[in-house]
Amino acid sequence: MRKIEGNGIRNIIHTNICIILMILVVLILTIAYKYITYKREVQASLETSVNVEELYNTTNKEEANIKEEENKKEKDIDSSTSDWELLLVNKNHKIPEGYTVELEEIETVHQVDKRIVEPLKQMLADARKEGLSPLICSSYRTNAKQQKLYNNKVREYERWGCGSEEAKEFASYWVAIPGTGEHETGLAVDIVSKDYQILDEKQEQTDVQRWLIDNSYKYGFALRYPTDKKDITMINYEPWHYRYVGVNNATYMKEQDMCLEEYIDYLKEFEEEEYKEIIL
């Protein structure tokens, strides 16, 4: 009887051990499954994060490229600073060494660069058709003549009590320093009204100047020294000085309210960008 009871107890213990082992196996398998599932989820999350970051970076790059394209200026006109009609001459840009000009007579007593004769003739003729009386009072000047005019202006300021250097500075705002004047290029003319030939700001009130200011661009001429640009041109307002720059250039300058210095700077921006693209 005791032997039977001992066998029964051992069977019960054995059974319980088996059950416990089975439970442990199930727990281990469950934990292992959850661990594997967790690792997969973490891996998937990391991959998603990387993809999102890549997408974010790609999107940012695309947006930056789009913004760069939007900010990139487009050149509105097919001109170059090396074009002959855009020769810049002022206090900071002297007439190039060895510069020559082929002159042609106009209005009997004047000479200009032969390339601007026809548009200048046409402009004067059209103004006269409107009943106006434009008169060229100055055109091409030799360096010697420019020097004489400049010296006279300097002496005038000295008579008013200015020192030598001060007189030269003041004079340069009215008469270009020799070698820096547009009249020496043959591309500029001074035009006044036959009825009022004084070179002062009242000249702009004449019918001739009103017509020229409104229409000169159609013939390729620009009012070279506007009143609101003298800090840039370094020449006082001259509502009689017209410079040939070509029809397209003069039209653009008028539309954008640019003097020649500003227009040259505008063109240089694109030329510098084009140069960078070439060397890169």
Image: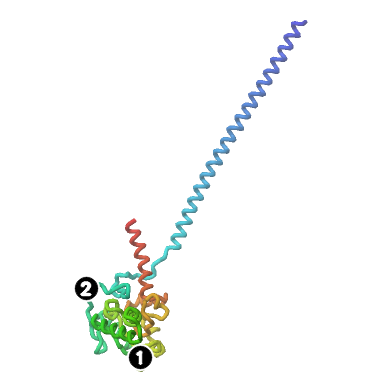
Q: Nearer the viewer, residue 198 or 189?
A: 198
Residue sitting nearer the eye, 202 or 22: 202
Quarter holding the N terminus is top right
Quadrant where the C terminus lies? bottom left
Q: Residue 14's image quarter? A: top right
Q: Which residue type does callout 2 highlight?
A: Gly
Q: Is residue 2 above or below residue 128?
A: above
Q: Residue 81, labelled with which disc?
A: none
Indicate the amino acid at tag 1. Answer: Ile
Question: Where's residue 266, x and y in %?
Answer: 38, 69
Secondary element under disc 1, as helix, strand or loop, is loop
- Is residue 74 placed above or below 147 in the rendered structure? above
Q: How is the image coloured?
A: rainbow
Q: Earlier in the sequence, mark 1 or mark 2?
A: 2
Element carrying mark 2: loop
Would you name the residue on which mark 1 appears? 198
Q: Decide: is 89 above or below 41.
A: below
Mark 1, residues whose alpha carbon is within 10 Å: few (<14), some, or many (≥20)? few
Residue 35: where, in percent of width, then height?
59, 32
The answer to whether any part of residue 103 appears in the image is yes
Disc 1 to disc 2, how far (Cα)?
34 Å
The residue tagged 2 is 98
Q: What residue do we see at 57% from left, 38% from top? A: 42
How far across and how far down the image is residue 246, in percent?
A: 32, 77
Q: Residue at x 35, y 71 (%)?
A: 264
Q: For this rendering, which residue is in front, 5 or 79?
A: 79
**What is the x, y in percent for residue 192?**
34, 89
Residue shown at the point (29%, 70%) measured from the top left? 82
